[in-house]
Amino acid sequence: MAALELRHLRYLLAVAEHGSFTRAAEELHISQPTLSQQIRQLERTLGVQLLDRTGRTVRPSDAGAVYIEHAHRALRDLAAAERAVHDVQDLSRGHLRLAVTPTFTAYLIGPVVAEFHARHPGITLTLTEAAQDRIEAGLAGDEVDLGIAFTAPHLPGIAATPLFTETLSLVTAAQHVPAAGRRPMPVQDLDRQHLALLSGDFATRGHIDAYFTRHRVHPRITVEANSIQALTEIVQRTGLATVLPDAITHDHPHLTPVPLDPPLPSRTVTLLTRDAAYRSAAARAFTHLIHDHVATRAYTPA
């Protein structure tokens, strides 16, 4: 594919994304007349109108929508091909794009990244925290190489490999452990609890709310936070309880898990990839490492 044709594709995608020749030209750092001329040249080459310019917003025509879908795929595949050409098999250099749901930064990502860096210091890592739907969209769009999230209905083309089973418990500060000790607390007792929980942006919060609904309990949510660290600090300094993965509170000196009866449902942690995507040496090395890490730590096998 010639360089001119690649430029045409990028220009077309920019106009389609912004719905405006003016904003697309600003992003591309070219003049609007030049951009319009290039798009018309592409349309003449194809013999079809790609954009509907009659409304206030520029929109793809029916033919344009089909062409844009293929253009996205072509540019994505070319970017993957460039990475493959520059991939260094001996791992002396390279780049890995990893996205994880936020709770994993509290207990999994730190030791895994430290181990990966110790083994492969020449590999640069871009780490992003995101909701699971954003991770899967990033994988589908070739913006992410690997994701760590949970088993769920996945987008088409996303492959999920089980890593381990995550369990959750009610968590209190050590000095506020219920009088019953660490015996399971009946779920009905949660009606008397004041809780600090993750905000609704977290998949974990949806998991917790579904448990409350299933058992018809209505604890008072006194604090909502979008940070695990904020929650653990609040629980340590107040009489509030929270719900967190057991792996976060394991060996924590100031937090104590309190099992519930019936227990909160467990979840399967998965490694997410895009089907048929190019797997760089760095991505393959990280995949092997995280499987080794999970196998040698106190995680429950998936």
Image (cartoon, rainbow, N blue to C red):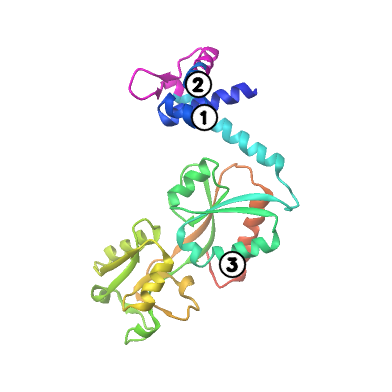
Number of residues whose C-alpha sits closer than 10 Å to that of mark 3, classed few (under 14), some (14–19) or many (20 or more)? few
Residue 192 position in % (x across, y down) = 23, 76
SS at mark 3 in the image: helix
Determine contact: label 2, label 3, CB under 8 Å: no
Q: Earlier in the sequence, mark 2 or mark 3?
A: 2
- Residue range in magenta is 38-64
The disc, 1 or 3, on the residue closer to the chain's N-terminal end is: 1
Q: Measured along the vertical axis of the image, is residue 230 above or below residue 286?
A: below
Name the residue: 66% across, 47% down: 280
Residue 128 percent coordinates (x, y): 51, 53
Name which residue type carries label 1: Leu
Amino acid beneath label 2: Leu
SS class of the residue under badge 2?
helix
Choose mark 1 or mark 3, whichever is in front.
1
Residue under label 3: 111
Where is the N terminus found, in terms of image quarters? top right
Residue at 49% from the left image edge and 66% from the top image edge: 106
289 displayed left or right of 20: right
Q: Which residue is mark 2?
A: 35
Q: Residue 62 in magenta?
A: yes
Residue 176 x, y percent position in the rendering? 34, 83
133 within the magenta span: no
Residue 28: which disc? 1
